[in-house]
Image (spheres, helix red, strand yellow):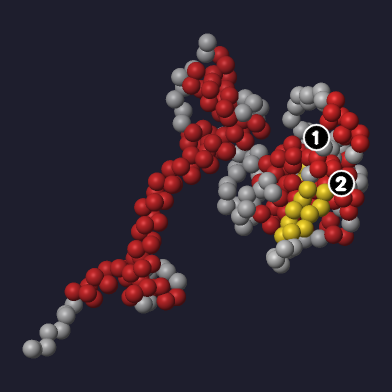
Amino acid sequence: MTRVPRGYIARRRRTKMRSFASNFRGAHLRLNRMIIQQVRRAFVSSHRDRGRQKRDFRRLWITRINAATRVYNVFDSYSKLIHNLYKKELILNRKMLAQVAVSNPNNLYTISNKIKTID
Amino acid sequence: MQKALAGLRRINLDGLRWRVFDAKGQVLGRLASQIAVVLQGKDKPTYAPHVENGDMCIVLNAKDISVAGRKMTDKIYYWHTGYIGHLKERRLKDQMEKDPTEVIRKAVLRMLPRNRLRDDRDRKLRIFSGNEHPFHDRPVEPFVMPPRQVREMRPRTRRALIRA
């Protein structure tokens, strides 16, 4: 049989992967077999954590809002604040509330007054 | 005293408050949970889980901590040394005689999340069995425990408390 070298197909596939591994550590960015494994793991983590990211940030916002309501004595707790927001149908989501709490605490008072006076 | 001042250089101290908890007459677990919240920095609106930003916590009067029920005689701390068959135990009463600060320290540490920040948070916690602390030159502020309804002690537990 004539000699049939395999050509450039595999090499092209592996070079494509290499670009994703350009900031990995040690052999993980140099050796092809390791690159394949680590890039696969990286993609899996990325996919799974995109869902987690939404959860994690909401948790962080809730913790911050809780702390802020207690510090500024707006309401006794996060739960009371959210309950009152829903009762008065103010659609502020937690991301905005957390940002307000961190950067502009005076606006928290504005929000709470609005909640207390609408009724 | 020297041990209380140790490790202060490792903590980045600017912007942190020094909160003083008085453990006299407080219930162990309830106090520990408040301390754990303050130590993690969860009472600040700028809380971030990957950054250690808790306040320094000083606990005074550790020997006057109280527990409900028969825990003084019946609560047992277990630990295993790693060698087979070596499960050690010690009762709360004995631990209080040996070192009362360890009781609060264990309670608080076991309420903190087990992650890489736990050691740093441990370093921020200073416990004293008496009423004095060597941090008078810092701006200390006392921590006011949240109000709590204390239920009247049942007769059997009251007898157990007296017996302990």
Residue B43 showing in the rendered view: yes
Chain ID at mark 2: B
Q: Is tag 1's residue or tag 2's residue first in the polypeptide sequence? A: 1
Q: Which residue is drawn at 78% across and 25% down?
A: B150
Direction top: furthest residue = A119
- As drawn, the label of residue B136 is none
Question: B120 left or right of B59?
Answer: left
Q: Residue at x 12, y 84 (%)?
A: A4
Question: A7 left or right of A30?
Answer: left
Q: Which residue is drawn at 77% across and 33% down?
A: B145
Q: Where is residue B3 in the image (x, y as percent from the top left)?
A: 85, 59
Q: Where is residue A44 in the image (x, y as percent from the top left)?
A: 37, 57
| Residue nearer the viewer, B133 or B146 | B146
Q: Residue at x 48, y 44 (%)?
A: A56
Can you say whether A23 is above or below B95 in the image? below
Question: Distance between the Cα atoms at labels 1 and 2?
Answer: 13 Å
- As drawn, the label of residue B68 is 1
Chain ID at mark 1: B
SS under mark 1: loop
Q: In which quarter of the image is residue B20?
A: top right
Please name the amino acid that badge 2 sits on: Lys
Please name the amino acid that badge 1 sits on: Ala
Same chain check for tags 1 and 2: yes
**Looking at the rendering, in which quadrant would you find the N terminus of chain A?**
bottom left
Q: Where is residue B118 in the image (x, y as percent from the top left)?
A: 66, 54
- State the residue position of label 2: B93
Is disc 2 surrounded by few (<14), some (14 to 19) or many (20+) residues within 10 Å? Answer: some
Question: A35 left or right of A70?
Answer: left
Residue B140 showing in the rendered view: no
SS under mark 2: helix
